Image: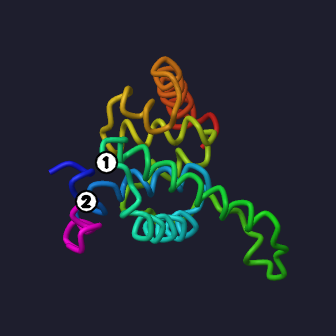
Amino acid sequence: MTLDEHLKKFAEGDTAGFDEFYLATKRLVYHIALSVLRDRTGAEDAMQACYLKVLAGASGYRAGTNAQAWVARIARNEALNQKKRRDRELAVDITESEPLFGTAQPDEYGLLTDVARRVLPEEEFAVLMLAAADGYKRREIAVMLGIPVATVTWRYHRALKMMRHALEGGKA
């Protein structure tokens, strides 16, 4: 069943449709949010907000317009909104001001994600996670992120080069 069909099923009142949609897109949404926020907790919050928007907007989704790109755009917008809110806040506790990178506890995606978060710019991180961790093809990533395939390929190779440098003792 396609993502469009799952959304249609959910819009018609079958909650199993949303469950399937969530299972098929959760890694994509997480990695996009993580690429913007660079913080696992923030990415999970943005992920939750994204799926609340999906729940609210499922009935208005136009079938056949690429559900992956639709949910990716929602995830990115939610993460950007959260980042803007966070940037306007003033930390009053020293523990809130500590760096967001280099955590000792890896998430379900592994320690390499932590290294990637520290050394890669947002765009390269998103491409690397979508390609390497989620297994999307470069043309799928291009559609999801709204950039040319050549740019996806360039960012992917640049991310690999930066990771290799970091793991060999450069930045990590």
Q: Secondary structure at mark 1?
A: loop
Picture coordinates of residue 157, whole percent (x, y)? 48, 23
Asked if the magenta segment contains residue 17, the reply would be yes
Residue drawn at (74%, 61%), measured in percent from left and top? 84
Q: How is the image coloured?
A: rainbow
Give the residue number, with chain letter if any, for mark 2.
8
Amino acid under disc 1: Ala
Main structural element of the magenta stretch: helix, strand or loop?
helix
Q: Quadrant of residue 59?
A: bottom left
Outermost residue toward the top in this view: 150
Q: Is residue 15 left or right of residue 120?
A: left
Outermost residue toward the bottom in this view: 93
Task: Give neighbour class at mark 1: few <14, some 14-19, many 20+ (Cα, 10 Å).
Answer: some
Please give the range of residues in magenta: 8-19
Which numbered disc covers residue 63?
Answer: 1
Which numbered disc covers residue 119?
Answer: none
Residue drawn at (41%, 59%), measured in percent from left and top? 60
Nearer-the-camera pick, 23 or 155: 23
Q: Is residue 134 left or right of residue 171?
A: left
Gap between marks 1 and 2, in whole Å? 8 Å
Q: Give yes or no for contact between labels 1 and 2 (Cβ–Cβ under 8 Å).
A: yes
Residue drawn at (53%, 22%), measured in percent from left and top? 151
Nearer-the-camera pick, 103 or 4: 4
Amino acid under disc 2: Lys
Picture coordinates of residue 98, whole percent (x, y)? 73, 68
Picture coordinates of residue 90, whole percent (x, y)? 85, 74
Picture coordinates of residue 12, whole percent (x, y)? 24, 69
Asked if the magenta segment contains residue 4, the reply would be no
